[in-house]
Image (spheres, rainbow, N blue to C red):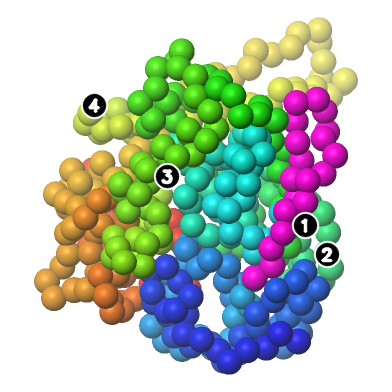
Amino acid sequence: MPAIEPLPLARLTTLRTGGTPERMFEARSRDELIDALRETWDRGEPWLVVGGGSNLFVGDDEYDGTVVLVRTSGIQRLPAPRPGRALVRVEAGHDWDALVAYTVAEGLAGIEAMSGIPGTVGAAPVQNIGAYGQELVQTLVEVELIDESTGEVSVVPAAELGLGFRTSVLKAHYGSVAARSAVILSVTLDLADVGHGEFPVAGEQLRRALGLDAAATVSLAWVRDHVLATRAAKGMVLDDADPDTHSAGSFFQNAIVSESFARTLPPECPRWPVAPDIDPVTVIPLSAYHGVVPAPVGSSPDVKISAAWLIEHAGLRRGFRLPRSRAALSSKHALALTNRGGASAAELAELARFIQGRVASEFGLILQPEPVLVGVEL
């Protein structure tokens, strides 16, 4: 069993907070990961899986349970499902950005806009990660996972994961538990085999971020390089020497609101329409069918609102901190809460609550945290 001397979670999370757990396993193979999880679950104690630690906000107290570090790695290219496509299966502990670099080098498109996102591949479906209009749900085929309730391993199609905006059935949102308590072992993606030539960039949000018009053509490598540069300018690429990157990335989610609520916000507030889920199948019981199919019920699409804009226009500029606090907004991006050196989880939580209160007071909207909170209250 891969047991190691427990390390403080402050050394394993990008926000640099968290006490030391009672027990810690470091799993470097699929079998070690399965064995560590089964032993932990048999104990019936609290448990926490840590990959890159980039989407965790952990409290200051010692963790009364077991932490399993996922350190598996490896990429397997599978037979293509159809011409022009490629399947890749990736171990859960593989570094996400290393996977993106591999796909770009192989001429495979579909996740290049998510370059520079910290963390591991196994965490990506939990959060349904995304950037600049690309989301994992667009390329995810299936995951292999192990369920806590049974200890059994199964392959689950992406359609059964409840993937939505920064959510899935595997994510424990603040104030709730995950709908399905399980740990991902591997992920399979379906990518477009476009090669290394230039092609038009799909998606207005990505084109806008890269300064491209609809007719421009660029290579995958160009997109990756420019996304990395854009993220680095916002302090969103990990750098030990840069306190602006000592964060959990975007701390608050961009808000999804109704179109009517969006109209109450200032017109200059950035917003993007969110396409409603459409069920193309209408089932009418034979006994109720009279030769007429009812027209579909129209609905206004929801709207995604920029949380960073709301924070800045609530009077909280980049670099803002409370008096005597070692926690602050990033000096490069208003959506990142940063540890400026030795900040406690309590200091970061105090800043987060202050931000929520200011935005709610100004705009009537309560921002929701994006990281998974462990032993922390907002």
* Gap in angstroms between the C-alphas marked 2 and 3: 36 Å
The residue depicted at 42 percent of the width and 68 percent of the height is 14
| Amino acid type of the residue tagged 4 in the rendering | Pro
- Magenta part of the protein: which range? 71-89
Against 329, residue 323 (above or below) is below
From the image, tell me which residue sits under label 1: 144
| The image quarter in which residue 344 lies | bottom left
The residue depicted at 36 percent of the width and 41 percent of the height is 230
* Gap in angstroms between the C-alphas marked 4 and 1: 44 Å
Q: Which mark is residue 19?
A: none
Q: Assess whether mark 4 and mark 2 are in contact (beta carbons under 8 angstroms).
A: no
The residue carrying pointer 2 sits among few (fewer than 14), some (14 to 19) or many (20 or more) residues within 10 Å by Cα, namely some
| Amino acid type of the residue tagged 3 in the rendering | Leu
The percent coordinates of residue 155 (x first, y second) are 82, 54
| Residue found farthest to the left | 323
From the image, tell me which residue sits under label 3: 228
Indicate which disc, 2 or 3, sits on the residue closer to the N terminus: 2
The residue carrying pointer 1 sits among few (fewer than 14), some (14 to 19) or many (20 or more) residues within 10 Å by Cα, namely some
Indicate which disc, 2 or 4, sits on the residue closer to the N terminus: 2
From the image, tell me which residue sits under label 2: 153
From the image, tell me which residue sits under label 4: 267
